[in-house]
Amino acid sequence: MKKLVAEFIGTLWLVLGGCGSAVLAAAYPELGIGFVGVALAFGLTVVTMAYALGHISGCHLNPAVSIGLMVGGRFDKKDLLPYIGAQVLGGIAGAAILYLIASGKSGFEIGGFAANGYGDHSPDGYSMMSALICEIVMTFMFLIIILGATHPKAPKGFGGLAIGLGLTLIHLISIPVTNTSVNPARSTSQAIFVGDWAMDQLWLFWLAPIVGAILAGLVYKYMSPNEE
């Protein structure tokens, strides 16, 4: 239960910090945030939670990460569904807090609410196929980074930093394409509040990250050095 509480809190913070920077700050050029600031915000949520909660739950914060770690032999399959449940609920809680804050401003309209999308709902108009490829590849690389940075033979103490910077880079690449998911819990949390098109397109932001994570787990398991 302590691990599940940690996953709930960590995913709440990821959504509140990352999506919150997009909804509350990125729309105001005078604040100097923009896409780069949002990308950095997502990375910072992972870095901070990795060091705060990593020793409790492993700090997955993402159903795709849990699945990739399971496939890669780093996570017990009996814990998979409870972890995913805690992550999705944490993400929804983070989005709910963000909604309560954002809706307190006069003239508030929910709009896209940092949801993920393709086609007309891609930030730069990318197609469904572009979004599918992007999300699979970005999640694949994210899991390669996670599996490598947390390997027993990796330099000690730097895993959280490498993973957070990796997520920042992924956002810098893919925000224009899909608004960056690589995380079904993050996508679900925002889609629930937007409804309509966001719920219709949510399938891609579950399918693609899971496919990318499974592929990464298999590839890293094959090329991983012995842990002794």
Image (spheres, grey):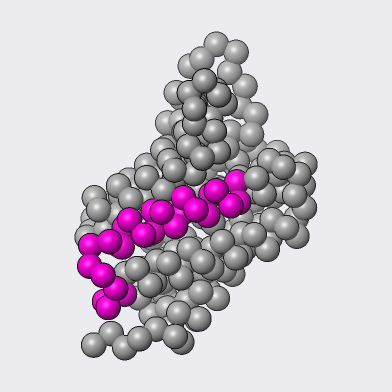
Can residue 11 be seen in the rendering of this structure?
Answer: no
Task: Tell me the residue at 65%/29% (across/down).
Answer: 111
The reply to whether residue 55 is in sight is: yes
**85 left or right of 170 in image:** left
In the rendered image, the quadrant that contains the C terminus is: bottom left
x and y, in percent, of residue 34 in the image: 54, 33
Q: Quadrant of residue 196?
A: top right
Q: Residue at x 49, y 31 (%)?
A: 33
Q: Position of residue 43 (x, y in %)?
A: 41, 48
In this rendering, the answer to whether 121 lies above or below 66 is: above
Q: Main secondary structure of the magenta part?
A: helix
20 up-or-down from 169: above or below: above
Residue located at (23% from left, 59% from top):
56
Query: Please, is residue 171 above or below residue 97 in the view?
Result: below
* In magenta segment, residue 164: yes
Q: Quadrant of residue 223?
A: bottom left
Q: Nearer the viewer, residue 206 or 151?
A: 151
**Magenta segment, which residues?**
151-175
224 or 190: nearer the eye? Answer: 224
Q: Considering the image in quadrants, where does the N terminus appear?
A: bottom left
Q: Residue at the location (39% across, 53% down)?
A: 164
